Image (spheres, rainbow, N blue to C red):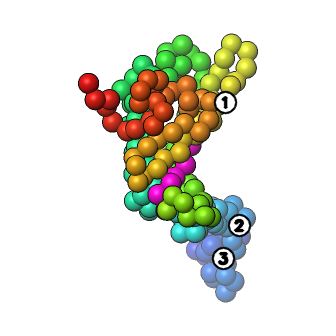
């Protein structure tokens, strides 16, 4: 026997020479199975999620989101800038802050009074206070036919400007 040509017991070479298939360890299976399952799950979620969760697939939902984000806010040119500045301020104070995802949902209108032009836009904001966390949900209703944005929650109402434009909450600048 030539000892130099013999493979170590349990190695791929020894199983090849003995005619056995190489053994798959649990770590090898998990190494490939876990990423594959995650990729399949992500693909399935992306394919089957309702369009109300993704404004990019519904042009009217995207328009409703844009109307809310670009609407004037108290103390800021737009609602989106107000949120961005709030997050920046919390971070400069070394306090935690978490701005959720913008969500857009078509409002149901069983009596067909408003057509298919009404959407609801939501976002959550979690902020760390001195001793506890606070969470607020900002909700707006948007009528695309009239381009009106109306606050539908107290936190959202606090961001909306007051004045002659507040009752209709029209999008865009107030005429001089």
Residue nearer the viewer, 93 or 51 = 51
Q: Residue at x 70, y 74 (%)?
A: 23
Among numbered discs 1 and 2, the one appearing first in the sequence:
2
Residue assigned mark 3: 22
81 up-or-down from 45: above or below: above
Q: Residue furthest bottom?
A: 19
Placement of the C terminus among the 4 image quadrants:
top left
Q: Residue at x 47, y 57 (%)?
A: 117
Residue assigned mark 2: 25
167 up-or-down from 111: above or below: above
* SS class, disc 1: strand
Q: Residue at x 55, y 25 (%)?
A: 158
* The quarter of the displayed image where residue 168 is located: top left
* SS class, disc 2: loop
* SS class, disc 3: loop
Q: Residue at x 52, y 52 (%)?
A: 119
Among numbered discs 3 and 1, the one appearing first in the sequence:
3
Residue nearer the viewer, 61 or 86 = 61
Placement of the N terminus among the 4 image quadrants:
bottom right
Residues at marks 3 and 1, CA–CA distance in whole angstroms: 55 Å
Is 156 magenta? The answer is: no
x and y, in percent, of residue 84 in the image: 45, 28
Residue assigned mark 1: 135
Residues at marks 3 and 2, CA–CA distance in whole angstroms: 10 Å
How many marks can you see? Answer: 3
* The quarter of the displayed image where residue 20 is located: bottom right
CA neighbours of label 2 inside 10 A, class few (<14), some (14 to 19), many (20+)? few
Residues at marks 1 and 2, CA–CA distance in whole angstroms: 46 Å
Q: Nearer the viewer, mark 1 or mark 2?
A: 1
Res 42 visible: no
Which region of the structure is painted magenta? 116-123
x and y, in percent, of residue 133 in the image: 70, 24
């Amino acid at each position: 026997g030539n000892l130099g040509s013999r493979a170590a017991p349990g190695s791929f070479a020894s199983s090849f020479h003995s005619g056995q298939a190489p053994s798959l360890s649990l770590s090898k299976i998990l190494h490939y199975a876990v990423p594959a399952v995650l990729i399949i799950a992500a693909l399935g979620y992306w394919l089957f999620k309702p369009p109300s969760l993704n404004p990019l697939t519904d042009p009217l939902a995207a328009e409703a989101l844009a109307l809310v984000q670009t609407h004037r806010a108290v103390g800021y040119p737009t609602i989106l800038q107000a949120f961005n500045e709030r997050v920046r301020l919390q971070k400069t104070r070394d306090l935690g802050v978490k701005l959720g995802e913008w969500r857009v949902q078509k409002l149901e209108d069983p009596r067909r009074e408003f057509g298919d032009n009404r959407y609801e836009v939501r976002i959550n904001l979690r902020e760390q206070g001195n001793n506890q966390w606070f969470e607020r949900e900002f909700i707006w209703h948007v009528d695309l036919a009239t381009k009106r944005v109306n606050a539908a929650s107290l936190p959202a109402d606090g961001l909306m400007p007051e004045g002659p434009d507040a009752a209709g909450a029209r999008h865009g600048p107030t005429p001089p």
